[in-house]
Image (tube, rainbow, N blue to C red):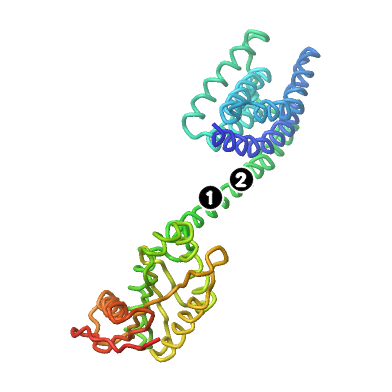
Amino acid sequence: MENQRGKGLSFARRIYMPRTVGLGIGCICVTAALYPLNVPGWVWVLMLLNGFVWPHFAYQIATHSPFPYQAERRNIIGDSLCGGFWAAAVQFNPIVTVTILSMMTMNNVAAGGPRLFLQGALAQLIGVVIAWLLFGISFTPTATPIQVWACIPSLTIYPLAVGMVCYRLAFKLSEHKRALSALSRTDSLTGLLNHGAWKDLLHVKFQQCRQNKVESVIALIDIDHFKAINDSYGHIVGDTVLRQLSVELRRTLREGDLAGRYGGDEFCVILPNMSLHHAREVMERLREVLNDYRHPPVPELRIKLSIGLAAYQTVFADAITWLNDADKALYTAKNTGRNKISIASNPAAEGSATRIPA
């Protein structure tokens, strides 16, 4: 219910400005059409109330309702009913009637699509019937030049107001779309790329390496004995370790490097335009920083990293072959004592790795 209320309040705020502008300037063209008809005084009072009081009253109704969205849709139906009433009250003066009904229709379609358009059309018909019951059925087939000029503000300013609202809404939706896209590619715990997003970028970087013949390196990082950390200190401490590693990755890597959480306690990094020697130095700094980290509530905790490196090779058939080479180097580091860096030496098929001891 709270979510519906938030959405409804936003909807009411979007409608408030176009309604205030539209009904205010709409009084100009209605006045020009009513004046020659010698209507009773209460009709003028009703027009002023509808043009200058109703927009603010409708906004208060919507914002104070338990369900603002539904209340605002009822307000829009009320707008349409009044529009039909004034079209019949001015005896269907052609220019005034077209202006009123077209502006109302544009508003209904923009606010609620075909369904609200049909509901609004029915409300306009009811408004016509009410006016005919009060004033009788009459038609004015022609419009004076003054009435034409009086409709120009409605035909220019009101569409501008609606267009601005639609533009702002489209801009917000675009921002939300970008935010959702970023969230779909981000690991919620660490803020790094998630498995799928990193894999997609790996294929892109592989093609760039193939086309541009540049040095690049993949690093796979595994936290040693991470299960034991969770079992001994709890998952909250384990999550802190994962976040700390992600923080240090951001501090250590360049802006163009791509770091992701590959799964569980395993992280992956693409280091484009970097030699294997330089990549080893970068990963060694990372390993040392994490080794020196002390968790305040658990000072005895130590974070050790096993890291596998694989440089891009022209013999690689695809990005997965490159990744598998880094994976073999990582397992070499894990199976030969951990807390070290291993570098893949034979990328094609042998799967051997050169170990760099801690």
Left/right of residue 47 with respect to residue 208 in the rendered view? right
Name of the residue lying farthest toward the left: 349
Residue 212: x, y in percent? 37, 86
32 is higher (above) or lower (below) than 45 = below
Query: Residue at horizontal 38%, vertical 64%?
Result: 228
Quarter in which the C terminus is drawn: bottom left
Q: Label 2, on which residue?
A: 163
Instruction: Residue type at mark 2: give it.
Output: Gly
Residue 309: x, y in percent? 35, 82
20 is higher (above) or lower (below) than 350 = above
Instruction: Residue type at mark 1: give it.
Output: Leu
- The reply to whether residue 144 is in sight is no
Give the Cα distance between marks 1 and 2: 15 Å
Q: Secondary structure at mark 2?
A: helix
Count residues near mark 2 (Cα–Cα under 10 Å), then give few for <14, some for 14-19, many for 20+.
some
Count residues near mark 1 (Cα–Cα under 10 Å), then give few for <14, some for 14-19, many for 20+.
few
> Considering depth in this image, is 345 or 245 the residue closer to the camera?
245
Residue 247: x, y in percent? 52, 70
Q: Label 1, on which residue?
A: 173
Left/right of residue 177 with respect to residue 5 in the rendered view? left
> Considering depth in this image, is 282 or 198 the residue closer to the camera?
282
Quarter in which the N terminus is drawn: top right
- The reply to whether residue 71 is in sight is yes
